[in-house]
Image (cartoon, helix red, strand yellow):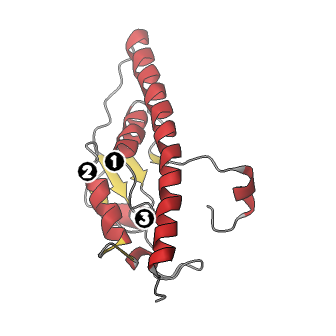
């Protein structure tokens, strides 16, 4: 496994916080959309079963072609996947958090879930409220069962194979 120096880690953290600013704006927009959906739901008086069983799954692959061993990279003394899992557990809307490939993890779980949230394993510093926003949006969307939060790319990032 490749060792990373302080400067590389610092650069990665700075880039991450730049992304975080974008996440905050998107979170505010998502919150507004959720509030509008809840308001419309209440106004129209539709009665639907509340979808309460929610699982968050963190897909993590050691043998990545772009960054082998990425889930185990140490960030301030803890593996990245551990930091992502710990942040995920802070989301108030998740009943369970798993760390395998999404479909494989769902097959291994003994419980059925109404909503599945795909949490990116390489986002160890995300805000748990982003997950809560995704869950709340899915809970009022009866046909949606699987989601992941995304952020917009700059046009120049579209050609970068490391941006997915």
- Density class for disc 2 (Cα within 10 Å; few <14, some 14-19, many ≥20) is some
Quarter-wise, where is residue 62 in the image?
Answer: bottom left
N-terminal of the pair, mark 2 or mark 1, is: 2
Residue 61 visible in the snapshot = no
View extreme (bottom): residue? 1
Q: Nearer the viewer, residue 20 or 38?
A: 20
Dot 1 corresponds to which residue?
128
- Tell me where residue 101 appears, x and y as whole percent: 43, 67
The CA distance from mark 2 to mark 3 is 15 Å
The quadrant in which residue 162 appears is bottom right
Closer to the camera in the image, 30 or 38: 30
Local packing at callout 1 (Cα closer than 10 Å; few below 14, some 14-19, many 20+) is: some
Residue ID for mark 3: 121
Q: Report the Cα–Cα distance between label 2 and label 1.
A: 6 Å
- Residue drawn at 75 percent across, 62 percent down: 159
Up/down of 91 relative to 3, above or below: above
Q: Is residue 97 above or below residue 5?
A: above
Tags 2 and 1 touching, CB below 8 Å? yes
The tag on residue 90 is: 2
- Please report the residue visible at 49 percent of the width from the left and 58 percent of the height from the top: 16
The residue carrying pointer 3 sits among few (fewer than 14), some (14 to 19) or many (20 or more) residues within 10 Å by Cα, namely: many
Which mark sits nearer the N-terminus, 3 or 1? Answer: 3
Element assignment for label 1: helix
Tell me if residue 154 can be seen. Answer: yes
Query: x, y (%) of residue 20?
Result: 47, 49
Expressed as whole percent of the image width and height from the top left, the position of residue 39 reads 41, 16
- The residue positioned 54% from the left and 48% from the top of the image is 150
Secondary structure beneath disc 3? Answer: loop
Quarter of the image for the C terminus: give it.
Answer: bottom right
Looking at marks 2 and 3 on the same chain, the residue that comes earlier in the sequence is marked by 2
Give the image quarter of residue 140.
top left
Does 28 sit above or below residue 65?
above
């Amino acid at each position: 496994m490749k060792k990373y120096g302080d400067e590389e880690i610092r650069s990665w953290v700075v880039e991450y916080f730049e992304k975080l600013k974008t996440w905050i704006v998107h979170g505010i927009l998502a919150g507004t959309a959720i509030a509008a959906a809840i308001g419309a739901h209440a106004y129209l008086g539709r009665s639907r079963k509340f979808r309460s069983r929610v699982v968050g799954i963190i897909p993590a692959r050691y043998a990545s072609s772009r960054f082998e061993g990425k889930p185990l990279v140490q960030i301030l003394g803890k593996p990245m996947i551990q930091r992502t899992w710990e942040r995920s557990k802070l989301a108030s809307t998740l009943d369970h958090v798993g760390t395998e490939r999404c479909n494989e993890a769902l097959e291994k779980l003994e419980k059925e879930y109404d909503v599945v949230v795909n949490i990116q394993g390489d986002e160890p510093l995300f805000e748990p409220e982003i997950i809560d926003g995704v869950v709340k949006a899915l809970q009022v969307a009866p046909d949606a069962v699987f989601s992941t939060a995304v952020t917009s790319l700059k046009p120049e990032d579209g050609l970068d194979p490391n941006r997915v």
